[in-house]
Image (spheres, coloured by chain):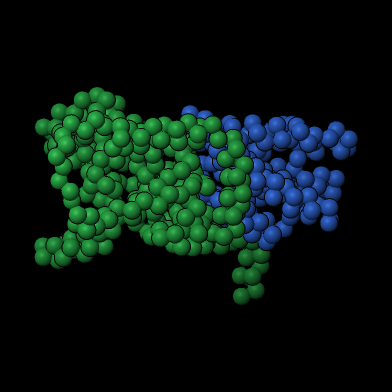
Chain colours: A green, B blue
Amino acid sequence: MRNLLIFITKYNAFFLFLIFEISSIIIYVKYNSFQKASVINSSNEVTGRLYTQINGLYDYLSLKEVNDSLARENARLRNQQKSSFYIDTIARHKINDTVFKTQYEYIDAKVINNSTNHSYNYITINRGSKDGIAVGMGVISGAGIVGKVVNVTEHLANVQSMLNKDTRFSVMLAKNREIGYIRWGDDLNPTKGMLMDVTNNAQPKLGEMVVTSGYSLFPQGIPVGRITNLHPKGGGISLNMEVTFSVDFTKLQYVDVVDYKFAKEQEGLEALQKKDD
Amino acid sequence: MIRTIIINVLRFIVLVFIQVFLLKNITLYNLSTPYLYILFILLLPFETPNILLFPLAFLMGLTIDAFYDTPGLHAAACVILALVRVMFINITVQKEGFDNEPEPTLSIMGFRWFFTYILVLTLFHHFFLFNLEVFNLSDIQFTLSRIVLSTLFTVFLILISGLLFYRRKERK
């Protein structure tokens, strides 16, 4: 017993190392596979508040870009207004509004923390469960899709960015509506993604738009990016190609969270189907 | 004694702020990312007992993790860094010299020793940090180039900060 104690005190550095190394590896493995529902992340009160304050400073530095993008979005929305179209048919059917039920609702939010240079990037936004945000909702910005909500506190939420090796979204080619899925590219480049598993007879072209398919969290037709490289990798039964994101993730400022009203219903229905198999 | 504690607490806070609000946003060509915060562990006094050194390294790592959203990753790398630090100092510094050489800084230890010290320790830290983050060996070449280039960046920043606080008079 005494010899053991002497042994431990003599090599105390090694044993201390073992204790702390094992505990940190445990923390690492545990919290990174459970979507980080932990105390130690940036939705945490202290780090969250610090980020909010520092963000106030950053806001002044990027006012010009935000103004530009808002002006652009204003112009785009004005183009969609009824008054900007020439009405060529006078006879119109009037449709009773009760036929429609809101399917998607948008909640605006501001990015208060963002990273683009890791293998697994996350965004923190300043809206939480109090504003109606729940885990699993999609997030878009004026230019295209951004990610999905993975973690919510009362006032803040964590968004798993498109620039995350775990992120997959169902998308399609805008022209011929061939379905595939989008994921981040392999070389940690914040502007490039990979479009995977498109059928071989799709015949995509360089510069073609890729948009959301409407099969997952997002409404159909939200832009994702443009095809910039057609190199078929892996080959076989499906095509893969490189896509340049339409969103500039390094300058993300304002986003919209998409509340898909039928998400629960769709999940339940599809779960039934799996049971039958 | 109290002065050393105050200096190290201040150093901890300042380095965390620099790392989280400034260096976190810097990446050169998606390859080179500086992690200056390890300077805190590198500059702890020689006489820091191991029972204090490891918890401090662990705490520093966890603090950075809290801001980087990677619980445990930086903590693991920092604890490894602390072990390498203990071994490196055991090999290269004589125990009797601790009285007039209290801290492993550039102004006290001289350029040659300090440069080897930070280069070796930074390499170890970055090696484990990046490999733990990627967690597979399939694109090891890419990871290795990230490690080497990030190490160069970090060492560069550490040398600059060493020169900033260089005091000639302290050398005896």
Left or right, A99 with respect to B158, comes to left
The residue lying toward the viewer, choosing from B108 and A203, is A203
Q: Residue furthest bottom?
A: A1
Query: Measured from the top left, where is residue A38 in percent x and y?
Result: 48, 62
Q: What residue is rendered at 76% in x and 33% in y?
A: B164
Q: Does residue B50 appear left or right of residue B152 in this picture?
A: right
- Please state the horizontal and vertical placement of residue B90, each as a whole percent of the image: 69, 48
Query: The C terminus of chain A appears in which quarter of the rendering?
Result: bottom left
Does the image show residue A235? Answer: no
State the image quarter where residue B59 is shown. bottom right
- In this picture, is A24 found above or below A169? below
Measured as percent of width and height from the top left, residue B102 is found at 80, 47
Residue at image point 54% right, 31% down: A64
Give x and y (percent) for residue A258: 34, 51
Q: Is residue A44 left or right of residue A37?
A: right
Q: Quadrant of residue B56?
A: bottom right
Q: Is residue B69 visible?
A: yes
Judged from this view, the residue extending furthest toward the front is: A90
Which residue is drawn at the image coordinates 24% and 44% (left, top)?
A: A220
Q: How many marks?
A: 0
Which sits in the foreground, A205 or A23? Answer: A205
- The part of the image, by quadrant, that contains residue A86 is top left
